[in-house]
Image (spheres, rainbow, N blue to C red):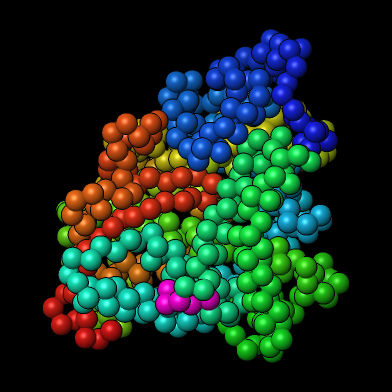
Amino acid sequence: MGETDLHTASAPTAFECCYRILLHPLRSYPGPLIAKITDGYAGWYALSRKLPLITYRDHLKYGSVFRAGPDRLVFNTPTALQEIYNNHRLTKSHVYRLTLQASGVESIFNCVDRDRHRSKRKLIAKVVSDRSVRLFEPTMKAQIQTFLQLLLATSKESSHSPINMTERCKRLGLDIIGLLAFGFPLNTQTEEENRFMIKGIDLGNYRANSFMQLPALKNRFLDPLVHVLTRKARLNYLRVLERMISTRLAMEKDAKVDFYSFIAEQVETGGPDSIRFNELWAEAVFFFPAGGDTTATAMSALFFYLSRSPEAYSKLADEVRHTFADGDAIKGGPQLSGCRYLRACFEEALRLSPPVGGTLWYELAKGEERNGPLVVDGHVIPLGTQLGVNIYSLHHNEAYFPDAFEFRPERWMIDDQEALHRMYTAFDAFSTGPRGCAGKSMAYLEAGMVIAKTLWYFDFEIAPGIMGAAGAGKRGGGVGRERGGEFQLYDGFTSAHDGPNLIFRTRGDYWKDL
């Protein structure tokens, strides 16, 4: 399907079906019959929020590369990962343009042009540079302190009150990213008013992902229907963003340590790295799910796996409690970065439950067809093909991660450097290449501080009874949903989830420092 017919796509005719099965350049690739005919195969599973699980199942059936749509190939090898996402001849697929908030106003997420993306990434890199992270860390620490104080308050109210860690982590992530983006206190941890934004972010991502997987949804009939169904949540969400931006623009550039303070000098300068005022809006819409939501998912997943892995829990608690002199000493620096088991636990949670677990579609950039055939993992790729590696599938590939569904942090601490390198080539939680996540170091810092500080002040365990089942797979749950030891993610580009529900108890008198 080409870019020109994205908005007019409909059910394929009998002739198109025959062509796609018998004559299409991708006809020799295995894959589900329906997927060869229509993007509706991926679209249906995207709408039901389980496309990564289905892709994993299909890889088991069809092998390391299969036809996931009429013009799409999905791979499951580290070689393909590098040859797609680290390839200067490839760029993001044209389907990313379906996620534009307004015509011509791009964010770093949906910017297809490589040069323009490079300029945008330079700006974002300023916000998440090591220097910027150090300057922002006191603000982050204050929000984490609130997170801990709220855990303390609940544990003091009742030693048997379960706490839903998805709710707590999502609120923490949103408050931190609101301050990082525009120095704006959303206060979702302590107040109800702006908590609806969490649902608004999820709806926006779900809508965008559905359009990218099934472009036919983005037409003059279905798009308005989606707008009507989500209108209230969307308008409320955008209204808060507008207030955040206008409030920040009314301040001096250096009034806050935030996104705007680092990029203000590039706003409307007219230079090659200039950013327009209306682009601030587009970047803000992307900033929240990219910066706050994904880290919250990673932390929720790690709480889930630790609560179900007594040996890992004990090892990590010992490491934290023997490394630091007190809770206030847990901050960015050599001690925190030297907690090898903490890092291993975080990466294992990211491997098992990647916050972005889908397939990021790429295609040959315009004009690159003149530079010879495109070859990926030994396959000569026909023109017009969209390519990708499914992150969830690669992270559960037994060839690189034996016992792939077991939470085993020790796999990241082996002495065999060759085996370790082999695993890291298949680890893609932050994406790879020039369009990979720029905020990786900030995510590690935030998650590291949250988990380490929590284990310094508290012990926790799964809530008893049915409350303790939140977040886990269950018998009869369907494809990929039956694994009780796996934290269940519901894909919408980023991930929705629930739980785990945990019981917290204070550790000695350490809580008195909170």
Seen as rendered, the residue at the extreme right is 270
Q: Is residue 189 magenta?
A: yes
Quadrant where the C terminus is found in the figure: bottom left
- In this picture, residue 485 sits left or right of residue 358: left
Q: Where does the image place residue 359, in percent across and percent down from the top left?
A: 56, 40
Q: Residue at x 32, y 31 (%)?
A: 476
> Main SS of the magenta segment?
loop
Is residue 489 shown to the viewer in this render? yes
- In this picture, residue 407 sits left or right of residue 359: left
The range drawn in magenta is 186-191
Q: Where does the image place residue 481, in percent across and percent down from the top left?
A: 36, 36
Q: Where does the image place residue 155, in percent across and percent down from the top left?
A: 22, 73
70 is higher (above) or lower (below) than 459: above
* Location of residue 284 (image quadrant): bottom right
Seen as rendered, the residue at the extreme left is 508
Q: Nearer the viewer, residue 264 or 401?
A: 264
* Image mark count: 0
477 is higher (above) or lower (below) than 301: above
Q: Nearer the viewer, residue 298 or 209?
A: 209
Is residue 93 shown to the viewer in this render? no
Q: Where does the image place residue 266, in percent across and percent down from the top left?
A: 76, 75
Q: Residue at x 66, y 20 (%)?
A: 37
